[in-house]
Every structure is written in structure tokens, then in C-alpha cells.
């Protein structure tokens, strides 16, 4: 199965993947900055999103170094880049699943205390397990030049390692497979719980003041659907190349497949930024206001809309509206 020939990484592949890395770097940085700047946005779900963004930031930087360099030997730089990307990539899988578990416990099990108590466990698992695996892989000389067989110029598990498939699983693939299974199940259960709760409340709507479904609620529902879908769409190309490696198929070198693999592995930070910053109205409004001092009409319209919506709430609606915000917006949209 091992092949000592360097797989060709074309210039257009490098350019596209480096651009994807840059977008993820900027997206992850924006998620982190919004959390730092606005203290009232520091909910636990968004804090978990920040930890995920740190992993995605490290992934984007390390992958960019690998794609730019296109390593051709087991140099110290290659090993360092491979170790950092392996750690960050695996950590990203764990944090992605951790956020889904938190939302499931918080929303479906209706236990914020239990959900918050899991945060320490998330840290131990999402940082500790990837670190332990990466340290073991480096110590056993498993990280290094892989001839771009299941990468796009960056280093990962050494191509000459006899048990490289095992280490590919341990340093990423097995956690990727588990995420494929876990994320859809958890988010389907969350969506089902929310829809049942909304249906149960529908019988009381005739006696409540008329208030159409909020845009935020529908957007949160859309995000619950998109989270596992986007994760799978981005990561599936890496999985396909890994399966083709196991089958010893030359199709894994197809330039289109290699490019999709590179984009998918490096786009998670950008995708998170789009969903949880740019498509989240309160944060989008603040960013727009900060950039233009509310001089643009869009900023003023969104700010006015948010203010009017809050003013229209009757005293008896405040608690339910806030609960919906916490349960379906700050929980889902902020992750």
C-alpha cells in the first residue's frame, strides 16, 4: 500500500486551499474577537464555540504552512506541522461533538446545571485526548512525511509506518467517523424536542397576543439542520480519500478530489463564522455598527427592528420570550 512517490500537488490546488485556510483563519478569529469584545455574548454555548474556533484557527494555520511548503521529507518542520494539525483537527472533532452534547442536555434534558457541569469534562476530553494521541504518535515516530496520499501537501502519518492505518484512525479518522454518527442523531433529537414543544404550545396561541414566529427562531431551526450537514459535506472528501487509500485506488490522486479534500479540511472555521456570526442578527448588527458607526441604513434598520421587537413584548411575554431566546437562539445559534 505504501508508495514512495510524492503525489503531485498542483499550483491551483495550493492557491485554492490556501485561500480556504485564510478564510478559516479570519472566520475563527472573528468568532473569538466577538466573544472577547462583547461580554454580554459570553454564554456557555458561545464559549464552547470559541474553544472550537481555537482548534479551527490552529488547523487553518498549520494546514496553510503544509500546503505552502508541500513537504517532501521527514524534516523537523514537517513533523511539527503534522503534530499541530493532527492535534487541532482531532480537537475540533471533539469540540464539535461536545457542543452538540451540551445542547442536547440543556434543551432535551432541560438541565442547565448538568450541561454546565459537563464543560470540565469537555476540556479534559477535547484537549487531553488529542494531546495524548499526538504526543504518543510523535514519540513513536509516526508523524511525518506522507507523500500527500491523504493530505494536500501537509504532513500527517508517515508513509513508511507499517501500522500507519491504525495511526490514521487514532489521529483523526476514527473520531471523524464517530462525529458522522453522533452529530445527526443529537441534532435530530434536539429539533424533534423543539418541534414537539412548539406543537404543545399551539393550543394556547388563540388566547395569546398575535405574534408571528420570530426570524431568530426560524434561523435557529435552520442552523440546527445545517450544523451536521455542513460538517459532513466538508469532511466527507477526506473520508473518501482515506477509503480509497485502504482500497489502494489511484483515484485518491484525482485533482478534483484532492482540491475538495483541501477545501473541506480547512473550511470549518469559515463555516462556523458564517453561521454563528454573520447569520446571527445581534452580532451582525454590532459588527456593522462598529465598522460604520451605524451610518449605513442596514445597521439602522436592524437596530430599529430589534428595538421595536423588544418594545412590543407585553410583560406577560417577557419570560417566555427570554426562555425561547435562551433555548433556541442562544443555545442553537450561538452553539
Image: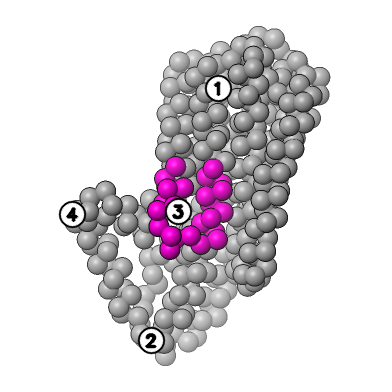
Q: Given contact means CB atoms under 8 Å apart, are the residues at marks 1 and 4 in contact?
A: no
Q: Does label 2 or label 1 sit earlier along the sequence? A: 1
Q: Which of the pair 301/253 is nearer the observer?
A: 301
Please name the residue that numbered disc 2 is placed on: 315
Q: Is residue 315 above or below residue 3?
A: below
Q: Nearer the viewer, mark 3 or mark 1?
A: 3
Q: Is residue 237 visible?
A: yes
Inspect the magenta stretch and tell me whether residue 42 lies in it.
yes
Image quadrant assignment for residue 90: top right
Residue 52 lies in the magenta stretch: yes
Q: Which residue is mark 1?
A: 66
Label 1 to label 4: alpha-carbon separation: 42 Å
Task: State the quadrant of the N terminus.
Answer: top right
- CA–CA distance between discs 2 and 1? 57 Å
Report how far apart the C-alphas of labels 4 and 3 lie in the structure: 24 Å
Question: With 92 as the anchor, is 164 left or right in this view?
Answer: right
- Dot 2 falls on a residue whose secondary structure is helix
Residue under the point 41% across and 65% down: 216
Measured as percent of width and height from the top left, residue 23 is found at 42, 36
Along the horizontal axis of the image, is 322 left or right of 247?
Answer: left
| Residue in the image at 44% along x and 52% along y | 36
Extent of the magenta region? 29-54
Q: Mark 3 touching mark 1, by CB under 8 A? A: no
Assign a secondary structure to mark 1: helix
Residue ranking furthest to the bottom: 207
**Image location of residue 156, percent across then percent down:** 66, 24
> How far is the residue under mark 2 from the one under mark 3?
30 Å
- Name the mark on residue 35: 3
Local packing at callout 1 (Cα closer than 10 Å; few below 14, some 14-19, many 20+) is many
- Circle 4 residue: 295
Amino acid at each position: 500500500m505504501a508508495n514512495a512517490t510524492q503525489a503531485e500537488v498542483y499550483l491551483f490546488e495550493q492557491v485554492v486551499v490556501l485561500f480556504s485556510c485564510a478564510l478559516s483563519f479570519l472566520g475563527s478569529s472573528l468568532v473569538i474577537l466577538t466573544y472577547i469584545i462583547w461580554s454580554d455574548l459570553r454564554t456557555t454555548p458561545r464559549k464552547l464555540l470559541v474553544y472550537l474556533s481555537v482548534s479551527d484557527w490552529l488547523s487553518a494555520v498549520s494546514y496553510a504552512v503544509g500546503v505552502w511548503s508541500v513537504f517532501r521529507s521527514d524534516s523537523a518542520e514537517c513533523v511539527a506541522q503534522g503534530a499541530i494539525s493532527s492535534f487541532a483537527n482531532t480537537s475540533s472533532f471533539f469540540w464539535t461533538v461536545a457542543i452538540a452534547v451540551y445542547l442536547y442536555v440543556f434543551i432535551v434534558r432541560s438541565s442547565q446545571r448538568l450541561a454546565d457541569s459537563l464543560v470540565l469534562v469537555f476540556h479534559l476530553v477535547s484537549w487531553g485526548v488529542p494531546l495524548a494521541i499526538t504526543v504518543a504518535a510523535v514519540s513513536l515516530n509516526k508523524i511525518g512525511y506522507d507523500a500527500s496520499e491523504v493530505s494536500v501537501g501537509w504532513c500527517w502519518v508517515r508513509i513508511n509506518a507499517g501500522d500507519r492505518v491504525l495511526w490514521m484512525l487514532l489521529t483523526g479518522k476514527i473520531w471523524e467517523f464517530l462525529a458522522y454518527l453522533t452529530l445527526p442523531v443529537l441534532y435530530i433529537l434536539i429539533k424533534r424536542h423543539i418541534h414537539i414543544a412548539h406543537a404543545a404550545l399551539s393550543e394556547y396561541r388563540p388566547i395569546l397576543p398575535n405574534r408571528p414566529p420570530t426570524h431568530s427562531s426560524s434561523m435557529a431551526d435552520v442552523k440546527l439542520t445545517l450544523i451536521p450537514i455542513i460538517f459532513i459535506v466538508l469532511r466527507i472528501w477526506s473520508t473518501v480519500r482515506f477509503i480509497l487509500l485502504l482500497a489502494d485506488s489511484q483515484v485518491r490522486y484525482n485533482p478534483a478530489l484532492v482540491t475538495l479534500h483541501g477545501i473541506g479540511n480547512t473550511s470549518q472555521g469559515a463555516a462556523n463564522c458564517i453561521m454563528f456570526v454573520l447569520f446571527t442578527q445581534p452580532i451582525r448588527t454590532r459588527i456593522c455598527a462598529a465598522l460604520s458607526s451605524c451610518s449605513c441604513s442596514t445597521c439602522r434598520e436592524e437596530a430599529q427592528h430589534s428595538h421595536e421587537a423588544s418594545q412590543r413584548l407585553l410583560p406577560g411575554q417577557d419570560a417566555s420570550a427570554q426562555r425561547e431566546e435562551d433555548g433556541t437562539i442562544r443555545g442553537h445559534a450561538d452553539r
